[in-house]
Image (cartoon, rainbow, N blue to C red):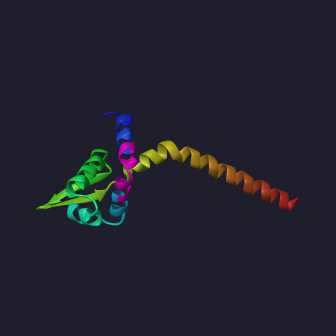
Amino acid sequence: MSSDDKTDLVFKALAAPIRRDILDVLRDTPQTTGEICARFSHLNRCTVMQHLGVLEEAELVLVRRAGRQRWNYLNALPIKHIHDRWIGDYAMGAVSMIDRLKTGLETETVA
């Protein structure tokens, strides 16, 4: 699978608000699938499992089985890769602009 295909999967996974909510739940601590289903009780288990499948396919969720339990872990690396590719350069430009503004204002104050 090419890098662009992987990126497409991540964007697709992040496009649904419920999947972003699931990632928020996993941000602090891994959860079992049962715990996630309980937190999203307005959805049936099958629907939650489908959303987890999309997140797993995009490698945003890593799964470890322990006995009968399925533990879901957040994998933030795909999001970091998107940040580095799409946001990092823009953020550096903004930081440089702020630095130039600060330097300009300090120079005016001294003069």
Q: Position of residue 96 (x, y in %)?
A: 66, 49
Query: Residue at position x 35%, y 35% from top?
Result: 5
Q: Main secondary structure of the magenta part?
A: helix
Q: Quadrant of residue 28?
A: bottom left
Q: Is residue 19 left or right of residue 80?
A: left
Q: Position of residue 95 (x, y in %)?
A: 63, 52
Question: Which residue, as the protein is rendered here, is positioned at the far front?
Answer: 42
The quarter in which the C terminus is drawn is bottom right
Q: In terms of depth relative to the viewer, which is nearer, 111 or 41? A: 41
Q: Position of residue 8 (x, y in %)?
A: 38, 38
Q: Position of residue 19 (x, y in %)?
A: 34, 53
Q: In terms of depth relative to the viewer, which is nearer, 56 or 108? A: 56
- Is residue 84 rendered magenta in the image? no
Which stretch did the figure color magenta? 11-21
Q: In terms of depth relative to the viewer, which is nearer, 44 or 33? A: 44
The quarter in which the N terminus is drawn is top left
Query: Residue at position x 34%, y 33% from top?
Result: 2
Question: Which residue, as the protein is rendered here, is positioned at the far left?
Answer: 67
- Is residue 18 rendered magenta in the image? yes
Number of numbered discs: 0
Question: Which residue, as the protein is rendered here, is positioned at the far right?
Answer: 111
Q: Quadrant of residue 70?
A: bottom left
Query: Residue at position x 84%, y 61% from top?
Result: 109
Query: Residue at position x 35%, y 57% from top?
Result: 23
